[in-house]
Amino acid sequence: MKSTIILAVGLAAGSAGVRETLATAQTDSPLAHVTNSFHFAVPASLSRASALFGPEGERCWAGDHWNPVFLYPQPAKDVEGAVFTVQHGPHQSVWVNTLFDQAAGRMQYVSFLPDTLVFTVDVRLSALTSSTTKVEVTYVRTALNAAANEDVLALRKRDGENGPEWQRAIEHCLAAERKSEH
C-alpha cells in the first residue's frame, strides 16, 4: 500500500456561503476525502440555538428521517459522549457526540457507515445579537473504500444546499414553538 501527502485545494462558492475543500488520499485505490462548510443565522439567542444541535434537539427541525436511537445514555439525553444510531434507508449509521458544550455553542460528532464512509460534523455557534445566532457547520467525509467515492462526492454537492434548508427548518421550528406558547 503506497501513501502520499494529501493535497487540499480550497474553492469558494458564491452567494451560498459554502466553502469546499476536496482532497484525495492516494493508496492502492484513491479514496475521496471532502471538507465542506456552510453558515447561516437563526432568530434565537445563543442558549436557545445551542439546544437545537443535540441529537434530541434536532428532532424539532431535522425532518422525519432524523430519528436517533440512543445506545447511551438511557434515557436519551443530549450530552457529550452520547452514542446513537440513525437509519438511512437500508443503512444504519453510528454516531458519537465527541463535544457538546451548549454554553460555548460547540458541538461535534463522529459518524460512520460501516465499510462505506466516516465523517465528522463540527457545529460552532456565536451570538450576533442577543436574539440572533450565527451557525457554522463543517462536514469532513472520507470514503472507506473506492466504491464509496461517488457517495462521498455526491454528499459534498448536497452539503452546499444544507445551509438554506437548515435555516428554514430551524426558523419553522422556532415559529411553531412561539405559536404554541401563545
Image: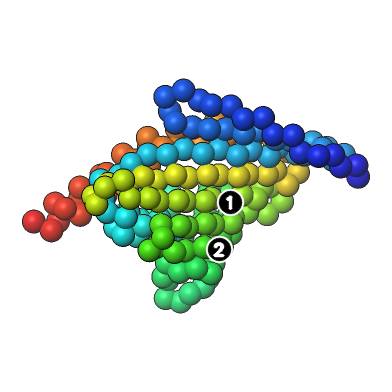
Query: Picture coordinates of residue 180 (x, y %)?
Result: 14, 56
Q: Secondary structure at mark 1?
A: strand
Q: Secondary structure at mark 2?
A: strand
Q: Is residue 144 left or right of residue 161?
A: right
Q: Residues within 10 Å of mark 1 (few under 14, many from 20)?
A: many
Residue 177 can be seen in this image:
yes
Amino acid carrying label 2: it is: Thr
Q: Is residue 29 above or below residue 127?
A: above
Q: Residue at x 86, y 42 (%)?
A: 3
Query: Picture coordinates of residue 93 (x, y %)?
Result: 58, 55
Query: Picture coordinates of residue 149 (x, y %)?
Result: 70, 36
Report the residue marked by disc 2: 98
Report the residue marked by disc 1: 120
Q: Is residue 159 left or right of residue 181?
A: right
Q: Residue at x 46, y 38 (%)?
A: 38
Q: Residue furthest top?
A: 14
Q: Residue furthest right?
A: 1
Question: On the rendered image, what quadrant is the C terminus found in?
Answer: bottom left
Q: Is residue 106 above or below residue 33?
A: below
**Colour scheme in use:** rainbow
Q: Residue furthest bottom?
A: 74
Q: CA distance from mark 1 to mark 2?
A: 10 Å
Amino acid carrying label 1: it is: Thr
Residue toward you, 102 or 52: 102
Q: Residue at x 50, y 68 (%)?
A: 80
Labels 1 and 2 touching (C-beta < 8 A): yes
Labelled disc at residue 164: none
Corner quadrant of residue 77: bottom left
Residue toward you, 110 or 45: 45
Q: Residue furthest left?
A: 182
